[in-house]
Image (cartoon, rainbow, N blue to C red):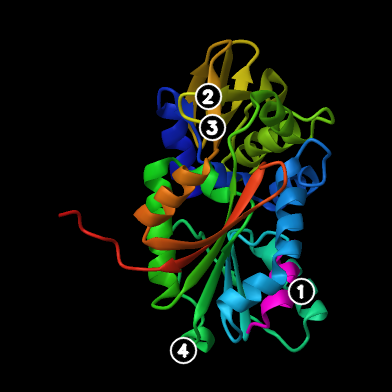
Amino acid sequence: MSFREDVIAGLRARPRAIPARWFYDRRGSELFEAITALPEYYPTRTEAAILARIGPELAALTGTGRAVVEFGSGSSAKTPLVLGAIAPAAYVPIDISGAFLRESSQALSADFPALAVLPVEADFMQAVRLPDDVAALPKLGFFPGSTIGNMGPADAVDLLRRMRDTLGQGAQLLIGMDRIKDPAVLIAAYEDAAGMTAEFNVNLLARINRELAGDIPLEAFAHEARWNDAAARIEMHLLATRDIAFTVAGERFAIAVDESIHTENSHKYGSRDARLLLAAGGWTPVKEWTDADGLFAVYLAAAREVEVAP
């Protein structure tokens, strides 16, 4: 669906919800990169430390000459840790934010001048056609940041299957998943003291106003992070602080005080949960790495056909 279709459908729905992928216009992408450097936001630095540590082992398990295909590449901040470890033949970053994608690709090309960097502007939640230049190469999918947690289990399984189809036979997948932990640690990571995550959340409304002729009063919404224990996920909401009426794309909406627009989920996985999710998506877990505190995990998996139950 398009941005307009998703927003209108989400505002009509009860409860109201807008898919998290629409956070990432240029400003949203910049804000998220800033969030990853915050002291409360442990996932980025923890995953980066894991990737830096496992380089030699990862190289032995993947071999050389693969095309690294990164889904939702953003600034490609962690990518050099993988590219430097495994000596790939090409790098294909996929991202929905075209300007951000091109800038990060140019920066990466400067750091790896001998590597073919082939950016693809696309929504990786849909089927993606890879460049013909990498068609014959074995692939290593790279999906860091626990982005898989932004999807419900059914959508996550569907995405993993699409990744398997995109990457083809003999593919491997390197994927990060955030672990279940103390809710206080989780809430702090999504409700930082500097208010950066709040600005990131409200920027979605600013994008709606700018791109869909909206007149949403931004100051009438407050950012809120919630831990949903039953679903094992952090939820981000935009909470109305008063009764609000506004227009988006020519359609009128009204939201009552304390009603929210649900903007993001971040599911957390235990080790067995993660392995089951990968298996359901057509991947056989090969190796699992985590940090000393068990905050975050990185998995290497190999593509396989989805089994049919007897």
Badge 3 density bin: few <14, some 14–19, many ≥20, Cα 10 Å: many
Lower sequence index among marks 2 and 1: 1
What residue is rendered at 70% in x and 53% in y? 47
Residue 136, labelled with which disc? Answer: 4
Q: Is residue 277 left or right of residue 248?
A: left
Magenta segment = 76-88
CA–CA distance in space, label 2 to label 1: 38 Å
Q: Is residue 1 visible?
A: no
CA–CA distance in space, label 4 to label 1: 23 Å
Label 1 sits on a secondary structure element that is helix
Lower sequence index among marks 4 and 3: 4
In this orientation, which residue lies closer to the viewer: 212 or 267? 267
Mark 3 = which residue? 233
Return the x and y of residue 23 as percentages of the image width and height: 62, 44
In this orientation, which residue lies closer to the viewer: 23 or 38? 38
Label 3 sits on a secondary structure element that is strand
The amino acid on which the numbered mark 2 sits, given as a three-letter code, is Asn
Q: Name the quadrant of the C terminus.
A: bottom left
In this orientation, which residue lies closer to the viewer: 74 or 26? 74
Residue 108, labelled with which disc? Answer: 1
What secondary structure is the magenta-colored segment mainly? Answer: helix
What residue is rendered at 55% in x and 20% in y? 260
Give yes or no for contact between labels 2 and 1 (Cβ–Cβ under 8 Å).
no
Lower sequence index among marks 3 and 1: 1
Give yes or no for contact between labels 2 and 3 (Cβ–Cβ under 8 Å).
yes
Label 2 sits on a secondary structure element that is strand
Mark 2 = which residue? 228
Lower sequence index among marks 2 and 4: 4
The amino acid on which the numbered mark 1 sits, given as a three-letter code, is Leu
CA–CA distance in space, label 4 to label 3: 39 Å
